[in-house]
Image (cartoon, grey):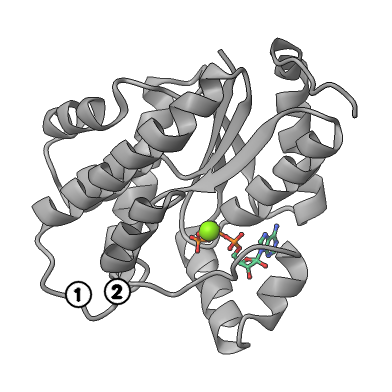
Amino acid sequence: MGLFITFEGPEGSGKSTQARLLYERIQALGYPVILTREPGGTRISELIRRILVDLRHTEMAPTTETLLFSAARAQLVSELVRPYLNTGGIVLCDRYADSTFAYQGYGLGRDLDELHAITTIATGGLQPDLTFYLDLDVEAGLQRKRWARDRGSEASKAVSSSGPPAEWNRLDARDLAYHQRVAAGFAELIRNNPERWRRCSAEQPLDQLAEQIFAAVEPILERVARLEPH
Ligand SMILES: Nc1ncnc2c1ncn2[C@@H]1O[C@H](COP(=O)(O)OP(=O)(O)OP(=O)(O)O)[C@@H](O)[C@H]1O
Ligand SMILES: [Mg+2]
């Protein structure tokens, strides 16, 4: 039943850049593959994303935030991810449920069991086959994003070649201690489930990182049938 690969990590660690590079490489090899993101990826989920990232929404309650992420995820899984996996394709997703545990759980202090219950409702229990953790110092990642923002995202566009530039949003704007708790949360998630995760240093040049990621994916590509040549 297809292959589900997700990208996680702190802000500005290169998730969107690497997800796109992997997508282009797998597609060029002739495999059926889609690239999507969270929150977002469907019409309804992208509308929910706008509410979540809006810098003006400072009054949003943690429960609202958690449920909106979950609602966006439920729509993405049911409309796009599951149907595509059921056709035997590869789904690459820029963030997924692990981010809820890291950000709303460890970051905002929501009860982890409660998050498990909500996430199971949203996803029907769908778990990635493989998750890349792009490991970067929290401050370095936020700095990369600030540079991209301040330079009008020109550098970001040049490096990541396609897709939207890194945005500066409501969740990025939280304090450093919050982002540090999130990073520690990811470390805990990896410890609890090491076989699913591949931890990669995001400090290396992006081409080198892309090679490392592809090398981890290549052996499992054989589970997926290539598209018929036209
Ligand atoms: N390996 C790298 N080395 C240096 N800079 C990089 C690297 N990878 C990406 N960048 C730059 O860092 C910034 C953030 O990259 P990107 O948007 O891919 O990260 P992200 O993890 O998706 O961020 P976000 O948290 O906003 O989703 C961009 O300006 C990008 O060009
Ligand atoms: Mg991104």
For label 1, the SS is loop
Q: Position of residue 84 (x, y in %)?
A: 54, 27
Instruction: Name the residue beneath numbered marker 2.
Output: 54
| Residue at 76%, 73% in the rendered image | 158
Q: Is residue 142 visible?
A: yes
Residue 28 against residue 193 in the figure, above or below: below
Residue in the foreground of this view, choosing between 23 and 178:
23
Q: Is residue 95 left or right of residue 17?
A: left
Task: Tell me where residue 153 sits by quadrant.
Answer: bottom right
Q: In this view, does 138 lie to the left or right of 119?
A: right
Q: Is residue 108 left or right of residue 206?
A: left
Query: Which residue appears farthest toward the front when viewing the image?
Result: 230
Quadrant of the image for the C terminus? top right
Residue in the foreground of this view, choosing between 205 and 4:
4
Q: Would you say the residues marked 2 and 1 are in contact, meaning their CB atoms lie under 8 Å apart?
A: yes
Quadrant of the image for the N terminus? top right
For label 2, the SS is loop
Instruction: Name the residue beneath numbered marker 1.
Output: 57
Q: Position of residue 156 (x, y in %)?
A: 67, 73
Q: Is residue 109 left or right of residue 212?
A: left
Tag 1: Cα neighbours inside 10 Å, few (<14), some, or many (≥20)?
few
Q: Position of residue 7 (x, y in %)?
A: 54, 41
Is label 1 within 8 A of ligand 1 (CB to nearest ligand atom)? Answer: no
Query: Which residue appears farthest toward the right when viewing the image?
Result: 230
Q: What residue type is labelled 2?
A: Asp
Q: Can residue 106 be seen in this view?
A: no
| Residue at 64%, 46% in the rendered image | 19
Q: Position of residue 193 (x, y in %)?
A: 42, 20
Label 2 and label 1: CA atoms lie apart by: 6 Å
